[in-house]
Amino acid sequence: MTKPPYRAIVFGATSAIASAILREITRSHSAEFLLVGRNATKLGNLADDLRAYGANCSIHTIDFLDPTTDWSAIIEKQTGHWDLFLIAHGSLCEQEQALTRSIDVAHEIAVNFTSHATIAATCSAALRRQGRGTLAAIGSVAGDRGRQSNFLYGSAKAGLATFMDGLRHRHAREKDIHIVLLKPGMTNSPMTADIPKSPLFSSTAKVGALGWEAIRRATPVAYLPGWWRWIMFAIRATPAALFHRTKL
Ligand SMILES: NC(=O)c1ccc[n+]([C@@H]2O[C@H](COP(=O)([O-])OP(=O)(O)OC[C@H]3O[C@@H](n4cnc5c(N)ncnc54)[C@H](OP(=O)(O)O)[C@@H]3O)[C@@H](O)[C@H]2O)c1
């Protein structure tokens, strides 16, 4: 008997990290993807790319920041069982400038937290109806400690981590439902194009492969690559008196 395709709905599918995860999935599975994003042209290009890897793709264009978006109507319209809901979108702003305008602060929190929370809540309900499947979201090591250089982005990612923790607790008795938080460190993607590169950067291909492994294994919280766990442990453990002397 042929194995059914691996089916995933991906929010913010055009993200370089998400695209790399999807390519990894096509290496080992026949796959069906619903690619959700804000830009129809980019989604179309991604769908063509993934079709070349053998995936069956459809696209859905939507404004992620519209608070009236009815995510459940979108998800419920899709028939059948979904193996994975992946929430990937995000934005890294120029923080000092953003902090001077409350609308920019609100925008960053909306892109990096509020939209994730509304989508994740809807996916949680869908998982409960299905009785199995995985919800994964892309957080960041930046959520592990507030640092002067990126606490606007970092605090949204910290909120996402707590939300995912709570969902994991909520579904703890449903053994076939998995809640996965991916925490990449610095990754060489369009988001970080303007940041000078250092040996701490990883490629999107590497982070995508590790991200898929974490999803496949249902790892609750995965640092990508794993050594970021120890860097962030050290950063969290540094006493404030010392930490506040750094420019981190
Ligand atoms: N790169 C890193 O160093 C790094 C490190 C840790 C965590 N992360 C996280 O990894 C995830 C993926 O990022 P990436 O590195 O793959 O960057 P990327 O390629 O720049 O992808 C960013 C994604 O977010 C979408 N997006 C941005 N603003 C949006 C908005 N207002 N509404 C809807 N979608 C929006 C983009 O859509 P368009 O394609 O339409 O622009 C794109 O799909 C993000 O959650 C990011 O925070 C990245």
Image (cartoon, helix red, strand yellow):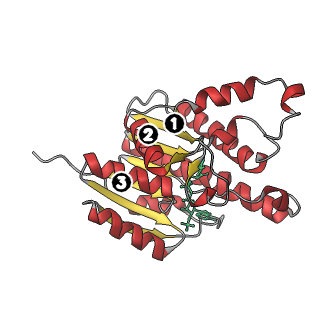
Mark drawn on residue 225:
1
Q: SS class of the residue under badge 1?
A: loop
What residue is shown at x 56% (from left), y 42% (from top)?
Answer: 184
Within 10 Å of disc 3 (Cα), the crowding (few <14, some 14-19, many 20+) is many
Return the residue found at the far left.
1
| 56 horizontally vs 248: left or right | left
- Classify the position of ligand 1 by quadrant: top left, top right, bottom left or bottom right: bottom right
Q: SS class of the residue under badge 3?
A: helix
Pinpoint residue 224: horizontal percent, then vertical percent: 52, 38
Q: Earlier in the sequence, mark 1 or mark 2?
A: 2
| 141 horizontally vs 177: left or right | right
Q: Which residue is mark 2?
A: 210
Pinpoint residue 163: horizontal percent, then vertical percent: 63, 40
Q: Earlier in the sequence, mark 1 or mark 3?
A: 3
Pinpoint residue 168: horizontal percent, then vertical percent: 53, 33
Q: Earlier in the sequence, mark 2 or mark 3?
A: 3
Within 10 Å of disc 2 (Cα), the crowding (few <14, some 14-19, many 20+) is many
